[in-house]
Amino acid sequence: MQASSTEESSRKRPLPSEILPDELNKVDFSLRISWRKNVHITGEGILPEFSKESPALCHHVNAICGEARACTIHLPHGPVETPVFMPVGTKGTLKGLVFEEVSKDPALNNQIILANTYHMELQPSTSLLKDMNGLHDFMNWNSNILTDSGGFQMVSLLKLAEICEEGVTFESPFSEGKRIILKPEDSIKHQINIGSDIMMALDDVVSSVTDDASRFREATHRTLRWLDRCLSVHSNREKQNLFAIVQGGLDTSIGGLREQCLAGFRNRDDNIPGYAIGGLAGGESKDQFWRVVHQCCQALPNDKPRYCMGVGYPLDLVVCTALGVDMYDCVYPTRTARFGVALVDSGIVKLKSHECSKDKTVIEDDCDCQACRFGISKSRLNGWLKSNNTLAAQLITNHNLVYMKRLTNHMRKAIKENAYPDFCRRFLKKQFPDNDVPQWVRDALHAVDIEV
């Protein structure tokens, strides 16, 4: 695609050195940041070969279709096939489900879930988890775990947080007047106690709708400094991986904040086994959202995983996978289930609605979730929801996670068959039968040569 006049003019404007960290002053920001874009295809079933640089992660790209990738991420607790949606178990549990369902139900069989460092430290405490030989043993989970660093709470709990160079200070939600400080070093210590297979570096997160350019610049450069502090105390590299998180707000300009963060990560690439795209899904426009994801995927190396944090709407997964993302997490599928909303190929079904009260059909044909598999009708679920029977929320939660698993399986299959554009068009036809596909979706897919 031809560069816009704005991009052309920005190439001619050198960045003032006083706004850059010393390490970035010699970076050529007249060109887009990117590195190691060659792709090596490895067949499925090939055994992993871990390296001195990456002793706990081996990344195989099994197939590509345009920018979309089907990969296998080999981790200490087994392989993870991508694209993958990670259910969120904030405090080491998925609300409404027992872990036997998540790991042994053939319709789920999740290979990785997410837990949250901040909440795990509050209750039950990561020192207790260490005494229990880590979160895997504590919750009897034999597959992989990714832990968020606690950075997101700088946005979600902003009224309770104070942020400075040392770290983040939170007011305890349980004890009035008690203050909790979370430094980069503390975050890594907690995550080592948890024993997660993938740890996230503590980053300085600013809400994407904040109107403060200086705060975004401060947070972007601080994220680089905090990453160095995280790396300096990462003492369990043989069993745990530490991912870096790209920040920079919505600034996707050449030489802009996202570029500066990416350039800093390129300098540290030997110590980073995988990357996340952070600072999104916070209220920004979808047009801004996809452009950040696209820029990061175009920049980040092709031989390491890419994780888009906090993204879980099915439409977003389909689009972001086309852009080159591998991993996702979000509370949306499980939280919306507790409000009686089921995910289906055509969008959603509001099971509390009057229309469902006399509907004898299951949520979705050809679905292997517990409710659909055993013939539990929408009418029956509607009655349970209206009587506050918790079984309804449990069954809809199971259904939504099965839906997400089936969606990512179909995405992976389409990539392997070199048919992902056709998959996107079929998916959109079901979601938007009147062809009223949002313009941001059309624009995002057009950027990777998929026309709808």
Image (cartoon, rainbow, N blue to C red):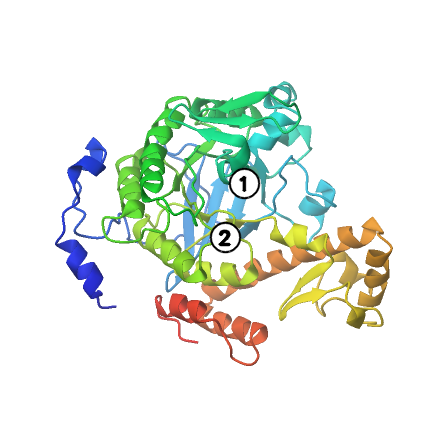
Residue at left 50%, top 40%? 155
Query: Residue type at mark 2?
Result: Thr
> Residue 248 appears in which quarter of the rendering?
top left
Q: Is residue 128 above or below residue 146?
A: above
* Disc sitting over residue 156 in the figure: 1
Please name whichever residue, 204 or 67, is drawn nearer the observer in this view of the structure.
Answer: 204
Q: Which residue is mark 2?
A: 82
> Residue 410 appears in which quarter of the rendering?
bottom right
Query: Residue type at mark 1?
Result: Ser
Residue 168: x and y, percent?
Answer: 47, 27
- Estimate how packed mark 2 is, as few (under 14), some (14 to 19) or many (20 or more) residues with alpha carbons within 10 Å: many
From mark 1 to mark 2, how far is it between C-alphas?
28 Å
Q: Is residue 137 above or below residue 6?
A: above
- Compared across the picture, whether 389 is left or right of 77 comes to right
Residue 436: x and y, percent?
Answer: 51, 77
Question: Seen from this angle, which residue lies furthest bottom?
Answer: 434
- Estimate how packed mark 1 is, as few (under 14), some (14 to 19) or many (20 or more) residues with alpha carbons within 10 Å: few
Secondary element at image label 1: helix
- Residue 369 appears in the rendering: yes
Secondary element at image label 2: loop
The image quadrant where one finds the N terminus is bottom left
Residue at left 31%, top 41%? 261
